[in-house]
Image: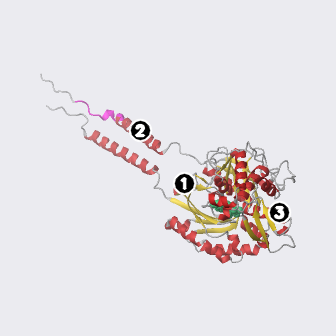
Amino acid sequence: MKERNPWHTPLTIIIAVIGVIAIVALVTIAVLQNKPLIPKYKYGIVLDAGSSHTAMYIYEWPAEKDNNTGRVEQTHCCKVSGSGISDYASDPKLAGESLKACMRDAERFVPSERHEETPLYLGATAGMRLLNIKDSAASDRVFQAVSESLQKSPFSFQGARILSGQEEGAFGWVTVNYLDDRLEQGLETTGALDLGGASTQISFISDSFDGSESPSNYVAFRLYGNDYNLYTHSFLCYGKDQALRMALAHQTQSGPGSIVDPCFNNGYSAVKNYSVLYESPCVSGRKPSSAPQTFTHTGKGNFYECQEVVKSIFNFTECKYSQCSFNGIFQPTLQGTYGAFSAYYFVMKFLNLTDTSVPLQSVKEALARLCATPFDTLKKQHPEVKLKFLNEYCFSGTYIFTLLTEGYNFTSRTFSDIKFIKKIKGSDAGWTLGYMLNLTNMIPAEAPDTPLLPHAGYVSVITVIALVLFVLFILSLRPLWPRCSQKPQIV
Ligand SMILES: Nc1nc2c(ncn2[C@@H]2O[C@H](COP(=O)(O)OP(=O)(O)OP(=O)(O)O)[C@@H](O)[C@H]2O)c(=O)[nH]1
Ligand SMILES: [Ca+2]
């Protein structure tokens, strides 16, 4: 007679089927519930209305990581053609018009279903600060015109305003450290050096600085559970274009007519207009009373003499604090590493000095060679470089060298702590990302709670526990298990 399998009772079969269904359901729910959602992104747009030009940056981040430690990345950048919005003071409508091509670009890069909820900001820096000083009604008209233009875009326009120098410096610092993952992980931070056309910013953490000596240079942050006491200062008029104006103005003081400038290469020559040179508030107070309409600006290319001219635009003597950078501005002792961007990068890139940390002496030698090169030779060596930039590299390089060493007090030892950078992990270094992170509350003050286990670990643990429970359940039903039927004895 065929032996009956003791498991083949209706009860055990039902228990087994229910058990298997329960496990499958449990694992399925665990997987679906915790699976990362299909990547869906959110967007933010910032227009950087600088003194020399406007640029639009589009940022994106995973939608479910909103208000968390999600990585915000720059996905697109559009350079507005023409000059900065402050140059449209006499025809503000054109400032609004100039932004249109980039805004159309943004409509293509941000998916249309996100347009309406995407915040759009415009922040203006030193060019508008200067226009506001010179003619505040004109600056209001420019803002009016750009705001009207941006309101017509499908995005959620959040306003156009001038950033204070302190904000510009602090947000540049946030950008650099956010992109380097230094904030979230509580690592030692990097200082930020930004050289624009009309102002320059220096921002860093110094252990010796708690804000008490100079409160206007102090910005306190609490980010991801860490406190930061940031030193920051923005020098209006010390961006490279305004610095050049000040250097030229200084040289025209000795007598109008012509300037033989050591900061321009030998062979360079141009006729320039006095009124144009002196129209900026950075120099307007110093216009010679009997100046003719024009002056001839020629180059003689000498780095050492150029340094003397550049030094003349700084005041190194006045200081009412324990220590100063220049112009009587407090600066604590330099500390840590620095990321130097904008014009610092453009100029050092031209000098081929961005890849490794460079000894200060090499920079000096490269500048001495550059300034001594006749302008014709320089043009032949760099046919690809725009003349308006090529003209000025001797001045710009010498200015950067002097600002860093004599101004901020970098020495041959600390100079190699500066890295000249343009982008970090695909996003441009600058104040715009930090500005948006702040306005969208994307950096929490406290460290967010992290899940106990990663997703895969969580699913595995749940599965193992389910299996163990199932086995225990089956074992607990032992009393109900059918007994082995005894073979009938043949007597
Ligand atoms: N050599 C070189 N210079 C550049 C380039 N792009 C911009 N510049 C110059 O570098 C300087 C700084 O440029 P930005 O950082 O864009 O300055 P900005 O933001 O307009 O000015 P701020 O409002 O003072 O911040 C200006 O004098 C620009 O004309 C470039 O590709 N090469
Ligand atoms: Ca800038």
Q: Is the C terminus in the top left, top right, bottom left or bottom right quadrant?
A: top left
Label located before the other in sequence (2 or 3)? 3
Q: Is the N terminus in the top left, top right, bottom left or bottom right quadrant?
A: top left
Packing grade of label 1 (10 A; few <14, some 14-19, many >=20) is: some
On screen, residue 443 above or below 13: below
Residues at marks 1 and 2, CA–CA distance in whole angstroms: 29 Å
- In depth, the one of 367 and 134 nearer the eye is 367
Packing grade of label 3 (10 A; few <14, some 14-19, many >=20) is: some
Which of discs 1 and 2 lies nearer the camera? The answer is 1
Label located before the other in sequence (3 or 1)? 1
Quarter of image, res 76: bottom right
Q: Is 480 contained in the magenta span? A: yes
Q: Which residue is mark 1?
A: 65
Name the kind of residue labelled 3 in the image: His
Start-end of magenta stretch = 475-484
Name the kind of residue labelled 2 in the image: Val
Residue 487 appears in the rendering: yes
The residue sitting at 68% across, 76% down in the picture is 92
Name the kind of residue labelled 1 in the image: Lys
The residue sitting at 57% across, 71% down in the picture is 101
User: In the rendered view, does 23 fall on the left or right side of 81?
Assistant: left
Name the mark on residue 464.
2
